[in-house]
Image (cartoon, rainbow, N blue to C red):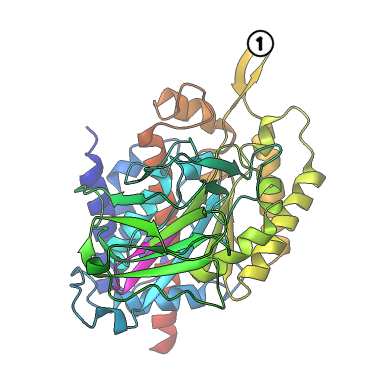
Amino acid sequence: MRLGWSSVSVLLALSYVLMSVGCGASAAPSAEREKVALDTAYLSSFGFLERDNNVIEAPDSLLEPFFDHLRRLEAKDTSMQCVCDDDCHDNDPDVLSVLHIGDSHIQAGILVQQVRTMMQTVFGNAGRGLVAPLRLARTNEPADYAIVSSAQWRSAKCTDREPSFMPGMTGVAVRTDGNDFSIFISVFDNKERPDYRFNSVTAYHSPSAPPLVCARELSVDMCCPDTSRLWLSRIDLTELTDSVTLFPAAGDFGTPEYWGFSLENGCDGVLYHSIGVNGACYLHYSNIAGSLLCTSDLGPELVIVSMGTNESSTSRFNADMLYRQIDDMLSSLRKAHPDALFMLTTPAQNFRRTRNGSVPNDNTVRARDVIAAYARENGMALWDMFAVCGGGKAAVAWNRAGLMARDRVHYTEEGYRLQGMLLFEALMNSYYNVTAREDVAVD
C-alpha cells in the first residue's frame, strides 16, 4: 500500500530535518545515505529506480556556497509563518533563491512544486515566487495559483514560430489595448503545500508599460517606479493575503505588456522560482536572450535548466547542434547571473512515435550524453535524471507503473511528484554528505 501524497511529502522532508540534528563528526557519508533510505519507503517501492548514487555531480567545492546558505537557513527557526506588521517591509529577510527553467514538464508545475514544498519544509518558506500569466496566454497554468483579468489579451511565447512581439523573461508575454483593465492574482490554500499568502508583489513588464498598483488602502505606499529597472514595479501590501487586484498606474505610458509576478512574504527561507514553456528547447530560450537578462532581479544562487525532451523527439537528432544550442542559452544565462551556480538535468527516457507505433526513444540517451558532457566540460553541476529513473529501461517501467500520461512523453501527477522527490533527494544527499565531511574536518 502506498502512502498518500501529503504523508509522503511530510515524511520525506522531516527525515532530512531529523538527519540534520544527528549529523556530526561520527556520521560518515554512507551512514547519511542509509538514513535517507530508511525514511523513503515510498521511493523504494519502485524497484526500477537507480537511487544508489542519486546525488548531484559537481566539481569539488562548486556546491559549497549554495550548501552554506542552506546550512544557515537550517540553523534558524523558519517553521513559523511571518506576521506582517507596520515594519515588516523594513526587514531584510535571509532568502535563498532558486530558478528552475524548462519545458512542459516544468510548466505543469507539479515537479517543481514537489521540490519547492520539500525544500521550504526544511529550510523555510519565503513565498510562492515567480508566477506567469499562462492562462491569459491561453495555455495551462499550475494548479496552485490563478491570474485572471477583465480584459482580452494577446500573447507571445518563445516557442511561437514568429512571435508578434518579444516574449518576456518567463518565456511568455501578454498585451492588451488601453488602460481600462485589472489583473487578479490569487494563490490557493492546500494542506499539501506551504502557506503562500504574500505581502509583496513584484510585477515584471516591458519598460514602457504602466506600472501596476493596488487599492490605496492595501498598499504600504504609493507606487514609485525604479528608474534603474523600468521593467519591474513592486507593490508592498499592508498584510498577508491570498489574493490581490492590480491596476495600471495613471500616467503617460506605452502598451500594457506583462511577463510575470513574484509573490513573497518577507520571511527567511527558500524562494523556488520556475519558468516553463510547452514545447521549449534550448534554442527557444536563446532566441529571447535579452529578456532572460531580466531574471537577474530574481537573484538566484542556483539556476537549474531541465530540457532535452523536445530535442530528442525528432528522428533527425543532431548532437553537435544540441551542444551549440545549450551553449548559446547558457552563455546568455551566465551573463544574467555571473555569480550563480548552474545545474543541468538530463531527461528521463520516454517513447517516440514511429510508423509501427510508439517505441522507447533511443534519442533520449543521446540527448542525455550531450547535456552531461556540456555540464562536465563547463564546470556545471549535473543531475542525471535519465540514470536515476532507470536508464534505457525507464520508459517501459514507468509506463507499466502507471506513471506516464497517455502520450507516453509526459507523466501523470504521481509521476511528476516522484521525479520531484528524486531531485530533492539528490540535493539533500549531496548537501548532507558535504555537511558531514565538513563537520569531520572541523573536529
Residue at image location 41% in from the left, 30% down from the top = 403
Residue type, numbered disc 1: Asn
131 to the left or right of 4: right
Residue 290 image position (x, y, % from top left)? 68, 61
Q: Nearer the viewer, residue 141 or 417?
A: 141
Residue 379 image position (x, y, % from top left)? 67, 67
Q: Nearer the viewer, residue 297 or 365?
A: 297
366 to the left or right of 245: right
Question: Where 227 sits versus 419, above or below?
Answer: below
Name of the residue lying farthest toward the right: 320
The secondary element bearing badge 1 is classed as loop
* Residue that badge 1 annotates: 356
The residues colored magenta run: 263-273
Q: Nearer the viewer, residue 200 or 411?
A: 200
Residue at image location 63% in from the left, 45% down from the top = 158
Question: Where 265 sits versus 443, above or below?
Answer: above
Residue 332 image position (x, y, % from top left)? 69, 63
